[in-house]
């Protein structure tokens, strides 16, 4: 859990990043950020720097591919994602033309663990 600017940010084991208004407890937004069906989960609090929320997945014991991503603090909208393993462009080296023109959720379900990169999805 992370408290910032009148909000509390919470990550959940089922892959959600939730912003709760600290003054009244109302959910400001709730975004699915990790995919438990792919073994992904969250086990640590998000980090806030300026107007960005940074988070990384857990689940390596379930075969999940590790990643870190940035999201907008105000909306939870994905900005970029980098993987800890894989082709250079996906871990932040070399060609960055694939910097998420499509947010990570746009590719959910199009790629399974162990499959090669296809459909332009990370």
Image (cartoon, helix red, strand yellow):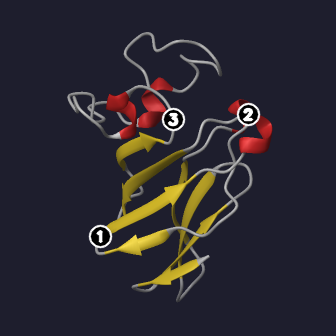
Hey, which residue is sitting farthest bottom in the picture? Answer: 23
Do the residues bearing badges 1 and 2 touch, measured as CB atoms within 8 Å? no
The residue lying at 67 percent from left, 36 percent from top is 64
> Residue 111 vs residue 59: left or right?
left
Residue 109 vs 5, above or below: the answer is above
Q: Position of residue 63 (x, y in %)?
A: 73, 33
Q: Residues within 10 Å of mark 3 (few under 14, many from 20)?
A: few
Q: Which residue is mark 2?
A: 63
* Point 60% across, 44% down: residue: 34
Local packing at callout 2 (Cα closer than 10 Å; few below 14, some 14-19, many 20+) is: few
Separation of disc 2 and disc 3 at Cα?
A: 12 Å
Kind of element beneath mark 3:
loop
Q: Would residue 90 be found to the left or right of residue 35 on screen?
A: left
The residue that mark 1 highlights is 51
Q: Nearer the viewer, mark 2 or mark 3?
A: 3
What is the CA distance from the residue labelled 3 to the residue labelled 1? 27 Å
To which residue does mark 3 refer?
85
The structure residue drawn at horizontal position 29% and vertical position 75%, both measured from the top left corner, is 50
Q: Nearer the viewer, mark 3 or mark 1?
A: 3
Relative to 118, residue 8 above or below: below
Query: In the rendering, at what x and y percent does residue 116 appear?
Result: 52, 12
Give the alpha-carbon distance from disc 1 to disc 2, as whole Å.
31 Å
- Element assignment for label 1: loop
Horizontal side of 44 relative to 21 (left or right) equals: right
């Amino acid at each position: 859990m992370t408290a910032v600017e009148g909000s509390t940010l919470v990550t959940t084991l089922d892959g959600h990043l939730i912003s709760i208004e600290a003054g009244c407890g109302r959910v400001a937004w709730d975004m699915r950020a990790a995919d438990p069906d792919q073994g992904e989960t969250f086990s640590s609090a998000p980090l806030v720097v300026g107007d960005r929320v940074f988070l990384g997945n857990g689940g390596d014991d379930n075969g999940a591919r590790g990643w870190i991503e940035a999201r907008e603090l105000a909306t939870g909208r994905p900005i970029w994602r980098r993987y800890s393993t894989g082709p250079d462009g996906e871990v932040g080296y070399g060609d960055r033309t694939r910097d998420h023109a499509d947010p990570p959720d746009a590719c959910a379900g199009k790629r399974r663990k162990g499959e090669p990169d296809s459909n332009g999805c990370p």
